[in-house]
Image (spheres, rainbow, N blue to C red):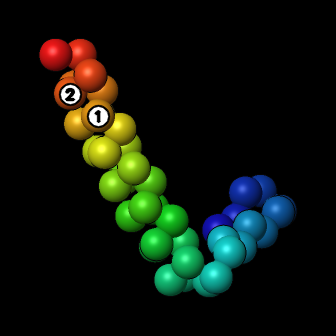
Amino acid sequence: MRFGNVEVRPLGGGMGCLFMVLGSILLSVLCTLGANLFAR
């Protein structure tokens, strides 16, 4: 990824970036389910 003239490389290359994105989606879903359970 490039922002202007700065290049940003994700940890672990492409696979590490993919796992980080999938992990964040899973965590957000789990947090939403947990909040819904506590709200009842």
Q: What is the crowding at mark 2: few (fewer than 14 residues within 10 Å), some, or many (at least 20)?
A: few
> Is residue 33 positioned above or below 29 on the image?
above
Quadrant in which the N terminus appears: bottom right
Numbered tag placed on residue 34 in the rendering: 1
In the figure, is residue 15 to the left or right of 6? left
Give the quadrant of residue 22: bottom left
Alpha carbons under labels 1 and 2: distance apart? 5 Å
Residue furthest to the top: 40
Q: Are marks 1 and 2 in contact (CB under 8 Å)?
A: yes
Q: Which residue is mark 2?
A: 37
Judge left or right: residue 3 versus residue 25: right
Question: Which residue shows up at 23% across the image and 16% down it?
Answer: 39
Please tell me whether mark 1 sits on a helix, a strand or a loop.
Answer: helix
Query: Residue 23 occupies which quadrant of the picture?
Result: bottom left
Please identify the quadrant where the C terminus is shown. Answer: top left
- Image x and y of residue 37, in percent: 20, 27
Where residue 33 appears, as percent x and y from the top left, is: 23, 36
Q: x and y percent of residue 17 in the render?
A: 54, 72
17 or 29: nearer the viewer: 29
Residue drawn at point x = 37 percent, y = 43 percent: 28
Would residue 28 appear left or right of 3 to someone viewing this image? left
Q: Residue at x 30, y 26 (%)?
A: 35
Residue plotted at (83% across, 62% down): 5
Q: Is residue 31 above or below residue 10?
A: above
Farthest residue, direction right: 5
Residue 3, given in percent of the width and then of the height, sits at 73, 57
Q: Across the whole image, how many numbered discs are drawn on residues?
A: 2
- Tag 2's secondary structure? helix
Residue type at mark 1: give it. Answer: Gly
Near-viewer residue (5 or 38):
38
- Comparing 1 with 26, the one in front is 26
- Name the amino acid, label 2: Leu
